[in-house]
Image (tube, grey):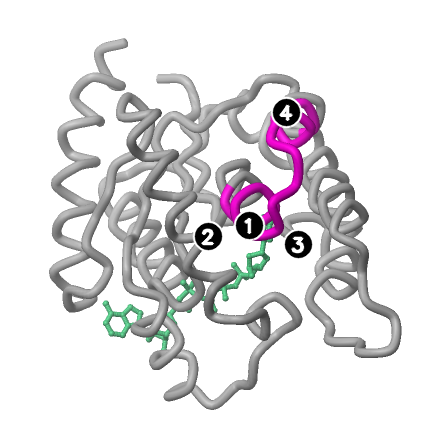
Amino acid sequence: MKGKLIVFEGVEGCGKTTQMLQTSEWLQNLGFSVIVTREPGGTELGLQLRRLLLEKSDDKPIVSKTELLLYSADRSQHVEQELLPNLASGKFILCDRYTDSTVAYQGYGRALDMNLIHQLNEIATGGLNSDLTIWLDVEVEVGFSRKKRDGLGLDRIEQEKIEFHRRVRQGYAELYASHPERIVKIDGSLSKEAVQAEIQQILTDKLKNWVNS
Ligand code: T5A
């Protein structure tokens, strides 16, 4: 079987990271070779870009178009250095955020030109799409109440106004409506166990097709 790219998406605190790690463990127990990675920050260069992107700096705000270019640069490096080689060697890649984040955050959130975003996504990925994208949908307030409970503070993007994050969620809803062949939606407000059970069910069905393809 060829390698597969499975992406986890959603607003802040939707539970992506938690679910991605549990899914990795489950797939490994089934005998698959799995790597987990993320954007931004899935490479050495990407870690530096992640810091630039998420650190709060009031006196030197990042211009929206620069922000878009930095996320694209991170993705370009990540695709070449991590995703393509691991897919070629037949691995399952579980990735925390990918191209849909740019559409949702820079497109819907920042209202940047959608054609420009699609062009940059195409350039950065060379046309590599996910085999499956799992969108964990929660109300923005639910995600932030989880983050508040964690007490870790908010990064530059998390500190945007609530309306920004509502537009991001709307962006995911529109992406889901446009790409039902690629994106599945799960109610991220359910318990961690219930969300994981749904993910395992979806992947069990997918695996039947993938193994035979
Ligand atoms: N970004 C990214 C862009 O603007 N454009 C882009 O192109 C890309 C790629 C990246 C930031 O960059 C932006 C989006 C982001 O702002 P990130 O690393 O993805 O940041 O950070 P977050 O999205 O903030 O990820 P978090 O790790 O904070 O949130 P997660 O992964 O959604 O949530 P998780 O699993 O860490 O859980 C958060 C808390 O909730 C609990 C967990 O235990 C944890 O305490 N939790 C639940 N509680 C109750 N019920 C459940 N079902 C729960 N699931 C998790």
Q: CA distance from mark 2 to mark 3?
A: 20 Å
- Mark 1 and 3 residues: CB-CB less than 8 Å, in contact? no
- Mark 2 and 1 residues: CB-CB less than 8 Å, in contact? yes
Q: Amino acid at mark 3?
A: Gly
Q: Where in the figure is residue 174, as x and y percent of width and height?
A: 36, 36
The answer to which quarter of the image holds residue 130 is top left
| Residue 43 in view here | yes
- Mark 4 and 2 residues: CB-CB less than 8 Å, in contact? no
Q: Residue at position x 34%, y 73% from top?
A: 141
Q: Residues within 10 Å of mark 2 (few under 14, many from 20)?
A: many
Disc 4 C-beta below 8 A from ligand 1: no
Q: Quadrant of the C terminus?
A: top left
Tell me which numbered mark, 2 or 1, is placed earlier along the sequence. 1
Q: Which residue is identified by label 4?
A: 115
Task: State which mark lies toward you, 2 or 3.
Answer: 2
Q: Which residue is identified by label 1?
A: 105
**Regarding mark 1 in the picture, which secondary structure is present there?**
helix
Tell me which numbered mark, 3 or 4, is placed earlier along the sequence. 3
